[in-house]
Amino acid sequence: MKDLKVIFMGTPDFAVPVLEYLIENTNVVLVVTQPDKEVGRDKKLVYSPIKKIALSHNVNVFQPVRIRKDFEIISEINPDIIITCAYGQIIPKSILDIPRLGCINVHASLLPEYRGAAPMQWAILDGKTETGVTLMYMDEGMDTGDMISKMTCEILPEDTIGSLHDKLSLVGKELLSKELPNIVNGTNDREKQDNDKATYTKMIKREDELLNFEDTGLNIINKIRAFNPWPLAYFKFNDIEIKVLKASFEAKNNTVPGKIEFGKKEMNIHCADGLIKLEKIKPFGKKEMDIVPYLNGIKKEEGMYVGK
């Protein structure tokens, strides 16, 4: 497939294995990614992971602020196929109609479940034990196009968004490598989605990161997993934000949500149906630490609560 003229659209680390596969096996003539971001107090411009990969392989990079209004270069190239993976902008019909083989998207869920943004996080938040990747034709809707193939992936109890992200990124590469020859030959399957079974996700917002100890222990642990290593779920104690990287749950009756129980080497927080036992945290302005060193440096009293 070295003569297959490909434009790839993607931005984060998740898309890197897919791009690397395409560079090795096809003719990637252009990579489209989000504009460079300003980071830190000095506002240093930082390349996206996809831009770094493209430049390292001498592939031309295009970074439109709004691709809906700036895509002339794509029309000029007239690729055989466009492949997207976590690009970050809606692709308009004027672009979808350009390639003869269509526009193909690598989406991190088992469609029609979890259309939209942050499907991996929401699968963990919802307590799913299985998710996967769907390879699909793009249309004007939000992940509504015809499906080509799916590949499942188990969500283990110890999985965080970090580990699930890494597993699914490799699943995406494997699925595309399996199906791309069929797409080129016109022998791939094509299945319409059942819109009655569709679910949609939303972008993760700051308020979603706050732990609510009136919730169940399962939901709290799932939130901690879903936001580790980024952006990290948190609570406030003594007016200081405490981010939680790791915790466990112990069922218990007669709890008082938000109340803190201190042990010699423990800090446990009551929730709706038990105790959240903190194991690894990151207090504001400090490095990640196990709970014992943190306890050695704070004042501990009976009757203390989170958020107070």
Image (spheres, helix red, strand yellow):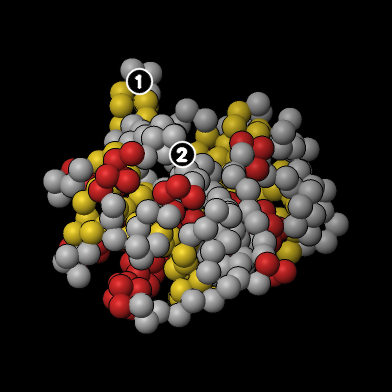
For residue 119, say whether it is visible: no
Residue positioned most to the right: 254
Look at 28% across and 55% down and name the residue there. Answer: 79
Task: Give the secondary structure at mark 2.
Answer: loop
Check the image and report above or below for 234 versus 222.
Answer: above
Which quarter of the figure is the N terminus placed in?
A: bottom left
- The quarter of the picture where residue 192 lies is bottom right
The x, y position of residue 187, in whole percent, is 37, 82
- The span from disc 2 to disc 1 (Cα, nearest Å) is 27 Å
Q: Provide the residue designation for mark 1.
A: 43
The x, y position of residue 305, in whole percent, is 74, 37
Which disc number belongs to residue 76?
none
- Disc 2 marks a residue whose amino acid type is Arg
Look at 36% across and 77% down and name the residue there. Answer: 186
Task: Compare marks 2 and 1 and give the one earlier in the sequence.
Answer: 1
The x, y position of residue 51, in whole percent, is 27, 42
Relative placement, left or right, of 209 versus 215 is left
Q: Are marks 2 and 1 in contact (CB under 8 Å)?
A: no
The x, y position of residue 97, in whole percent, is 43, 55
Q: Nearer the viewer, mark 2 or mark 1?
A: 2
Look at 49% across and 46% down and name the residue there. Answer: 92
Task: Give the secondary structure at mark 1.
Answer: loop
- The quarter of the picture where residue 273 lies is bottom right
Give the class, few, some or many, for how many residues have Cα within 10 Å of label 2's Cα (few <14, many ≥20). Answer: some
Foreground pick, 66 / 286: 66
Q: Provide the residue designation for mark 2.
A: 68
Look at 37% across and 30% down and name the residue there. Answer: 37
Which quarter of the figure is the C terminus placed in?
A: top right
- Disc 1 marks a residue whose amino acid type is Lys
Q: How many marks?
A: 2
Foreground pick, 145 / 212: 145
